[in-house]
Amino acid sequence: MKEFKSPNESRVSITELMLPSHSNFGGKVHGGHILNLMDQIAFACASKHSQCYCVTASVNRVDFLHPVEVGELLTLRASINYTGKTSMVVGVRVESENITTGEKRHCNSSYFTMVAKSIEGKSSNVPGLLIENEQGIRRFARSKRRKEEAFWRDTQFDASQFKMEDHLPQLQDENIKINLK
């Protein structure tokens, strides 16, 4: 296995026609179906980079920017943005295309943290990322920052560290009623 790999070595894309069986009650493609496709391509990209079976550890923010219509082509692209010791952040971009007009729309982007696993099920080391341009540095730095912010959020609201009085002032204008006993 190589010590470092470029994002191009594991980049993958898929295009799939959206069928009526993929629709929700509103007649649009179900968000859960799109998330399933995103998870599959993140798995393929991470497995290609690590040469290991990979599991999804977390998904960082999924914003559905535009609905996807039945009959449109959905293209998903994935590449490695960050590598740790055993984990990788896979950036996934989703675009829809109206096959009659050719109009393309960015539907969403998300970041999947994937962990490489050995045959025994233990976390396995992954090749580092060979960055060859400014965009790669930007993506790596952004993923590193996102990871640090998630750690900060998780520890700030840990039950053993949480101080209610620090947060009460910012809750005053929210749609809640506090009735402490």
Image: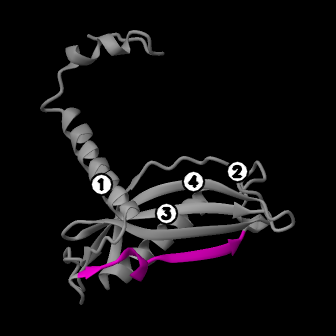
Instruction: Report the Cα–Cα distance between label 3 and label 2.
Output: 17 Å
Q: Which residue is mark 4?
A: 108
**Horizontal side, residue 71 vs residue 60: left or right:** right
Q: Which residue is mark 1?
A: 141
User: Of the residues shown, which amino acid type is indicated by label 4?
Assistant: Asn
Q: Position of residue 28 (x, y in %)?
A: 74, 53
- Above or below residue 165? Residue 30 is below
**Horizontal side, residue 171 vs residue 175: left or right:** left
Whether residue 159 is visible to the viewer of this picture, yes or no, is yes
Nearer to the camera, 136 or 80: 136
Instruction: Report the Cα–Cα distance between label 1 and label 4.
Output: 21 Å
Instruction: Report the Cα–Cα distance between label 3 and label 1.
Output: 17 Å
User: Residue 92 shows which numbered tag?
Assistant: 3
Q: Residues within 10 Å of mark 1 (few under 14, many from 20)?
A: some
Q: Residue extending furthest left? A: 160
Name the residue rendered at 47%, 55% in the picture: 110
